[in-house]
Image (spheres, rainbow, N blue to C red):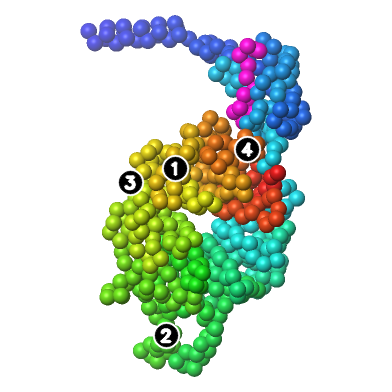
């Protein structure tokens, strides 16, 4: 019986194979050949650049037979068709078009065409030496004397500097963007790791830089903050060790064990630091080891992400400090990502924390001049997720961006504006907002808002990690024709880190971690002009 069953199964298998034998002509019998509805020629657009409202011609084939279903898109924005033939279609560049690839749509099929540059009012200055720029991210830029700028970041060279030691994370550049080679020594220049922020001293002609480094120009025990002379050298002093040997040390008495994210210089010369750190440290060089050799010890005081230093770098124990326990108060229970020193001397802080000195404050708080919590600042339930950045407008209102979806109990798409008392401002409306996180904010003299981050859409427009808004949150009608920024990493954090206006000019300098601006090479710095 077993034999018959096997024989029947074998015959059935052979029959099936014969019935569904594979054709030898190479065609798939289950798939029909789908021909494209249209075709766009390579470089098939004339002219290759233009302004909104100008007419251009796109060349290819198949336009006539698909005219009722055809849409021509400039970076996702539909253009009005003026006329067409089977091989050409004349369109008018739409008002919200931006630099990028032109595409055609027929039903659900998309056909990507040539690159097209949309000219507009908000343009990168191609004469500025952005192609050289920095070899890694620029975290901060501040205007200094003689129209020059101090830049700090992760870079180890700027402008192909001829200095033997290059420019390790600190440099001064001229007004035209070239490197100022008079700044810094030829050897042992700068720090061993990241510098995040800088301020200029108003009278001494010196600079403060801060970050996460532990030496400057090879001088040790320079803990996350350094005072620089006007020529870029470390402000240092000579001390004598117990053995009688002399040693050059930082002119500042102390520093931070950890990473400084924000630094603020008060009118009285005191220095406020916020960031991801727990201890104030001060080196003691007057020690000897059990063998009688010179020894150094870092005396430390716990201060929890917030500290105020005296002008000489010593610890100010009058700021959020517990004298009885010889340590800082509890402070924030998470990172202070961003802080702003307000005109009245109070400090606005934001980040990941949900408490300050044991009191509930969801990711934003205002501190009195002694570091205590200011109860008159009332943001309600605050933000439901991290606040990455904030900036103060001229009218005192504060713009917030981050990973949050709600603020003060109201839904907001990663961006909100609050009044100076912390209450959300309902007059600010960005609609759908961005489809990704926003990390940075900049303002223009007319109140326009520049946002950057890691997003591909803002509202219904396709935008490349950058958007310019009007003061009330609407997409600016004239300042968004450029192609945005190309990030140096998939994360995109800090894509644009700082924007500084050039005094007396209708232009600004933009720095960050980007490598292209408006699809042009721009190594972490670009100059942008506007009407």
Residue 199 versus residue 311 in the image, above or below: above
Say which label, 4 or 3, has the lower sequence index. 3
Look at the numbered disc 3 and give the secondary structure of its residue: loop
Q: Viewer-proximal residue, 342 or 395?
A: 395
* Residue displayed at 40% across by 87% down: 287
User: Magenta stretch containing residue 218, yes or no?
Assistant: no
Cα distance in 3D space between marks 3 and 1: 15 Å
Look at the numbered disc 4 and give the secondary structure of its residue: loop
User: Which residue corresponds to mark 4?
Assistant: 480
User: Which residue corresponds to mark 3?
Assistant: 381
Q: Quadrant of the C terminus?
A: top right
| Left or right: 375, with 111 as reference point | left
Cα distance in 3D space between marks 1 and 4: 25 Å
* Residue displayed at 73% across by 47% down: 126
Cα distance in 3D space between marks 1 and 2: 57 Å
Mark 2 crowdedness (10 Å alpha carbons): few <14, some 14-19, many ≥20: some
Look at the numbered disc 2 and give the secondary structure of its residue: strand
The residue at the far left in this view is 1
Q: Quadrant of the N terminus?
A: top left
Say which label, 2 or 3, has the lower sequence index. 2
Residue 476 versus residue 110 in the image, above or below: below
User: Which residue corresponds to mark 2?
Assistant: 295
Magenta part of the protein: which range? 66-78
Say which label, 1 or 2, has the lower sequence index. 2
Foreground mark, 2 or 3?
A: 3
């Amino acid at each position: 019986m077993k034999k018959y069953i096997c024989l029947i199964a074998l015959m059935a298998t052979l029959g099936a194979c014969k019935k569904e034998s594979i054709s030898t002509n190479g065609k798939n019998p289950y798939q029909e050949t789908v021909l494209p509805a249209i075709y766009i020629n390579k470089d098939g657009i004339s002219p290759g650049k233009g302004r909104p409202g100008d007419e251009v011609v796109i060349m290819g084939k198949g336009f006539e037979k698909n005219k009722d279903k055809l849409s021509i898109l400039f970076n996702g924005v539909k253009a009005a068709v003026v006329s067409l033939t089977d091989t050409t279609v004349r369109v008018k560049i739409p008002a919200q078009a931006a630099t990028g690839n032109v595409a055609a749509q027929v039903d659900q099929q998309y056909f990507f065409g040539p690159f097209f540059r949309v000219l507009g009012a908000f343009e990168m200055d191609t004469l500025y030496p952005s192609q050289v720029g920095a070899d890694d991210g620029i975290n901060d830029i501040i205007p200094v004397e003689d129209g020059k700028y101090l830049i700090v970041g992760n870079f180890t060279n700027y402008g192909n500097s001829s200095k033997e030691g290059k420019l390790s994370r600190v440099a001064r550049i001229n007004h035209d963007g070239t490197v100022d080679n008079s700044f810094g020594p030829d050897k042992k220049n700068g720090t061993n790791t990241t510098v995040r922020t800088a301020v200029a001293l108003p009278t001494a002609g010196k600079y403060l830089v801060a970050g996460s480094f532990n030496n400057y120009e090879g001088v040790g025990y320079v803990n996350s903050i350094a005072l620089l002379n006007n020529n870029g050298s470390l402000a240092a002093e000579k001390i004598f060790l117990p053995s009688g040997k002399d040693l050059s040390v930082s002119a500042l008495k102390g520093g931070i064990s950890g990473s400084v994210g924000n630094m603020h210089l008060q009118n009285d010369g005191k220095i406020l630091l916020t960031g991801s750190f727990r201890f104030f440290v001060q080196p003691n060089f007057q020690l000897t080891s059990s063998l009688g050799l010179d020894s150094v010890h870092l005396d430390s005081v716990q201060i929890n992400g917030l500290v105020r230093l005296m002008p000489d770098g010593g610890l100010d124990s009058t700021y959020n400090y517990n004298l009885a326990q010889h340590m800082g108060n509890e402070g924030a229970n998470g990172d202070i990502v961003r802080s702003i020193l307000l005109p009245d001397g109070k400090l606005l802080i934001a980040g990941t924390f949900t408490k300050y000195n044991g009191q509930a404050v969801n990711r934003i708080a205002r501190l009195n001049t002694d570091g205590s919590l200011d109860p008159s600042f009332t943001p309600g339930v605050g933000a439901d997720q991290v606040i990455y950045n904030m900036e103060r407008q001229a009218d005192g209102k504060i713009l917030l961006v981050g990973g949050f979806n709600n603020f003060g109990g109201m839904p907001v798409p990663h961006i909100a504006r609050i009044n100076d008392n912390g209450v959300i401002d309902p007059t600010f409306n960005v609609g759908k907002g961005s489809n990704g996180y926003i990390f940075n904010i900049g303002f223009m003299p007319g109140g326009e808002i520049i946002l950057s981050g890691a997003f591909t859409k803002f509202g219904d427009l396709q935008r490349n990690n950058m958007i310019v808004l009007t003061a009330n949150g609407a997409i600016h009608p004239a300042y968004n024709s450029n192609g945005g920024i190309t990030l140096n990493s998939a994360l995109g954090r800090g894509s644009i880190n700082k924007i500084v206006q050039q005094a007396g000019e209708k232009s600004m300098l933009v720095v960050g971690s980007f490598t292209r601006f408006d699809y042009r090479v721009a190594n972490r710095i670009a100059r942008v002009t506007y009407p």
